[in-house]
Image: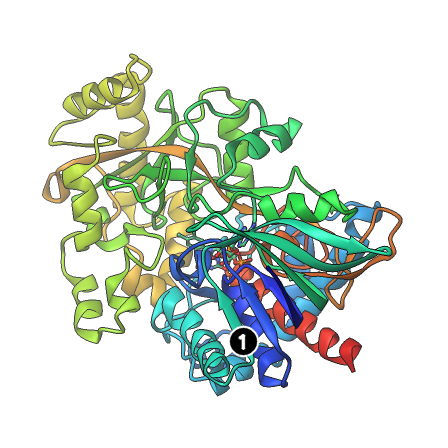
Amino acid sequence: MTTQTDVIVIGAGLAGLVVAAELADAGRRVMLLEGQATLGGQATWSLGGVFLVDTPEQRRLGIRDGIDLALDDWFASAEFDDGPNDTWSRRWARAYVEAAGTDLSPWLRSMGVSFFPLVQWAERGGGLADGPGNSAPRFHIVWGTGPGLVDPFLRRVETRQSEGLVELRLAHRVERLVVDGGRVTGCIARNTIDDTEVTATADAVVVASGGIGGNHDLVRRWWPDDMGPVPDDMLQGVPDHVDGSGLLAAHAVGANVINTGRMWNYPEGLAHHTPVWRDHAVRVLAGPGSLWLDAHGRRLPPPLFPGVDTLSALRHLTTAGNPHSWLLLNHRIAAAELRLSGSVHNPDLTGRSVGLLLKRVLPRPSDPVQAFMDKSPDIVVADEPAALVAGMNKVAGDELVDETVLRRQVLAYDRQAATGLGNDAQLAAVATARRYLPDKLMRTANDQRILDPAARPLIAIRLRVFTRKTLGGLQTDLDGRVLREDGEPLDGLYAVGEVAGFGGGGVHGHRSLEGTFLGGCLHSGLRAARSIQTELG
Ligand SMILES: Cc1cc2nc3c(=O)[nH]c(=O)nc-3n(C[C@H](O)[C@H](O)[C@H](O)COP(=O)(O)OP(=O)(O)OC[C@H]3O[C@@H](n4cnc5c(N)ncnc54)[C@H](O)[C@@H]3O)c2cc1C
């Protein structure tokens, strides 16, 4: 069967939905091909954090942010290369930060998106002012998390579908792109329910199929040399559909795939007690008060504290050859500081429930965290350090952690914590966090002593490396046009969202400031839609 339309969009995650909604609103006929039975892709699972700059929420909290400061942070974190693979990435980075500080937020608000008023301070860095990390809080969580961000686009697409402008094909997995006279003119998809083949042709084809985090073969093949060996027991932080199939289909017709070794994987993965996808990992979002220990129970060097510098922490662990690590904390710190990423594990924000939100101040872990404490074999709970260490070594299957070494470090830390000052760099990070009201309210315990008998039991959480975001991808120009290896556009083909490295084939360079993935889908989708609209005349 062959069908013809104005624009084909491959993938109905956030980036694909943005393109489809914008073009259908502009009167274009759009065919949306989605390999799964549902819409929204990863964004539905996401925490809904968007990197925005100089917003009303920031100003209400007294944060003086600005585009120049954000650009400094972005470029210091990205560590772009001088070569051709970062020519467009740099332009995309500048364009994204400028949009994040101007029209992105009013555009979202005009569709009814609102934000949790306490802006979070993710990936804060910990070194010098011109080093990596956010120098100001910029992680704006959508009120309603990921589903709250996807919903307005879904509604727009559904409205245009009812008017006949959008043709939605669920369970249609695109296998190949069609090229005619050097121009991409369509694609061939397989209906995964009845196993029939569909050929679709259009004036423009947009690949919006996401990254590679669910394809372990590709992740292993492209794993960068400077990250040590790929961990044998690596977990997966994305659904299985994040398999790189769209990227490979575009590559097969001449698209330039670049920066493949750049990935945004995390070291803080906890295996899910009720997995939904293969090797399902949940990211542990620890506040600044948990001690982060390597597989041998030694503290990670400063500034590698939780939430500070993901790439450096990951590299530290993977190059050491034994990449699992431990968070060491107690019940009081778990209650105040321990959270999990994703829409499902934050029912208060996802359900827009003020009542549930207020429960965050109760002196006990949140229900989702407690569920993991009850069910996860990787969480050890004990009243005494000796029993805790015995439990840790049992989980690791080896006597890697020495109780004397662990106890010495914790006693030294606790003595300093008790003074209220101290020269331990992590205590300085805690003090900085407590100067920021949302961190004081939502993210730091008021007493950081780990061994304090009043705060027991002690808790140790074994963390494993897991795959999440893909930072490289299809190289695109600022119009979202896919480029060939010779730098010229591959006519008819566009790419948006994660498959395009969120713009240019690598808008992040080597590091993300967080919230830049959803933000990058919105921005790249919007830009491509506008340029397709102009191109089609
Ligand atoms: C648990 C979790 C939490 C996250 N939290 C945040 C956060 O707070 N902030 C942030 O910025 N980012 C976050 N992210 C990352 C962010 O959600 C993703 O990077 C982003 O949603 C990617 O969107 P996308 O549209 O490019 O791709 P995807 O969401 O992967 O969508 C691609 C779609 O294409 C379909 N598809 C793939 N191949 C084909 C094919 N061959 N044919 C047809 N269809 C195909 C897929 O089924 C999918 O629906 C999170 C991710 C996860 C998993």
Q: Is residue 77 left or right of residue 367?
A: right
Is the CB of the residue bearing disc 1 within 8 angstroms of ligand 1? no
Q: Which residue does the image show at 42% across and 38% down from the upper left?
A: 236
Name the outermost residue toward the top. 399
Q: Is residue 519 visible?
A: no
- The residue nearer to you, when weighing 72 against 175, is 175
Q: Is residue 184 visible?
A: yes
Q: Image quadrant for the N terminus? A: bottom right
Q: Is residue 451 left or right of residue 161?
A: left
Residue 536 location in percent, x, y?
A: 77, 78
Residue 285 location in percent, x, y?
A: 36, 49
- The residue nearer to you, when weighing 530 against 376, is 530
Q: Quadrant of residue 389?
A: top left
Q: Is residue 338 left or right of residue 356?
A: right
- The residue nearer to you, when weighing 181 against 496, is 181
Q: Amino acid at mark 1?
A: Val
Q: Which residue does the image show at 65% across and 37% down from the upper left?
A: 261
The residue to which callout 1 is attached is 166
Q: Quadrant of residue 434?
A: bottom left
Q: Is residue 370 left or right of residue 75?
A: left
Q: Secondary structure at mark 1?
A: strand
Task: Classify 378 as above or below 487.
Answer: above
Q: Which residue does the image show at 22% across and 48% down from the upper left?
A: 369
Residue 148 location in percent, x, y?
A: 38, 72
Residue 336 location in percent, x, y?
A: 23, 55
- The residue nearer to you, when weighing 87 against 401, is 87
Q: Image quadrant for the C terminus? A: bottom right
